[in-house]
Amino acid sequence: MAAVAPSVARAQIPIAPASPAAPAPAAAPTPGPSPTPDAGPAPAPSAADAPAKAPPGDEYFVEQPPPAPNAAAAQEPPPFEPPVPPSFEPPPPPLGRHLAPQNSLVLGARLGWFFPFGNVWAKAKPVTAGGGYVLQGVPWSDYAASGPMFELDVGMRLSRSYTAFGLWERAQLRSGRSDNGIDGAQDGAETDFWAVGLRASSDPDGLGFLTEVAVGYRRARTFFKNDVQYQFTDAPFEARLGLGGELRLNRMTSVSSLITIGVGGFGSVERVGPTGTALPLTHGLDDGDGHAWATLTIGGHFDLLASKK
């Protein structure tokens, strides 16, 4: 209700009674028009012509202003914040000095021992009179025994740890176990392997773990004292895996020891006579088979035309 009629709210506030106002002096009479004989008596004054009187309690209440803020609090200094120390960027570490070159032409050689095993082909042998047969593998050891080998490598160092290379491996093998065949006694054997590969070293600047993978072509030959040869060829997908260690001696030279194992299969087995006439050793239902080999080698490699890095 106070919001609707503020004057009523103000009337509720007790105020001292105002002293009665002194009566205003009477105004001097102004001469009016002289009455005429025809005019009647003067009209009486109405209530509207009386002066308006203010209603009781029509007073204004002024709120006191809020107290002034404490001057001491207003002058209190801001909290202390320590200055931020200047940032310091340490200098970059010096570049490491590598013993192995980043890029180079790589020449290398290995010496080791070659172990042939597996089968050179599978011969069909009848098991029943009705035409049944079974394939029986002919061991490579019948025509070759383990012997010394050497290997030549030529490649490009792609980075300090990786080298792509080509290789030629020659193993000079001893005679196999089968000396009582149609061609008599054997006179030694040999095998060649041409391949491309990738070599990786875990620490090319020191002593690191060495891994090699190579894929290529192999051929093998067995010699007889009557000048006859048995040739095992047509093996284009021979694969070899090598594991070992490599030690860097200086910027140019490293030495390594490697154990390899490989697998493959000969697609052609022939008997070549003294005049060069070739006849297949496989007949009818005979089939190819898988062979394998292993080597133990040591070798050295040289980085030629090395980069300065």
Image (cartoon, rainbow, N blue to C red):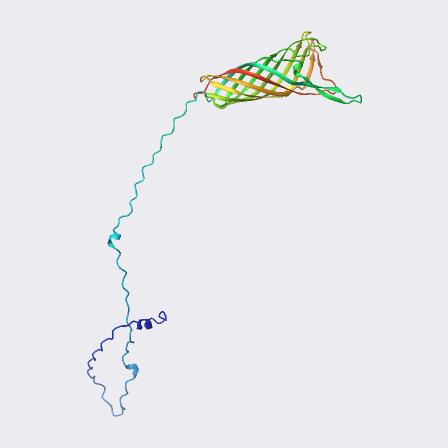
Q: Residue at x 63, y 21 (%)?
A: 264
The one nearer the camera, 1 or 161, is 1
Name the residue at the right extreme: 130
The one nearer the camera, 39 or 139, is 139
Name the residue at the top extreme: 226
The one nearer the camera, 145 or 238, is 145
Residue 282 location (% of width, % of height): 72, 17
Residue 90 location (% of width, % of height): 36, 31
Count of all numbered marks drawn on residues in the image: 0
Q: Is residue 232 above or below residue 87?
A: above
Query: Left or right: 186 with respect to 241?
Result: right
Residue 195's quadrant in the figure? top right
Residue 95 location (% of width, % of height): 40, 25
Query: Left or right: 253 with respect to 195?
Result: left
Residue 233's quadrant in the figure? top right
Query: Left or right: 92 with respect to 217?
Result: left
Point out the image quarter for the N terminus.
bottom left
Residue 196 location (% of width, % of height): 57, 20
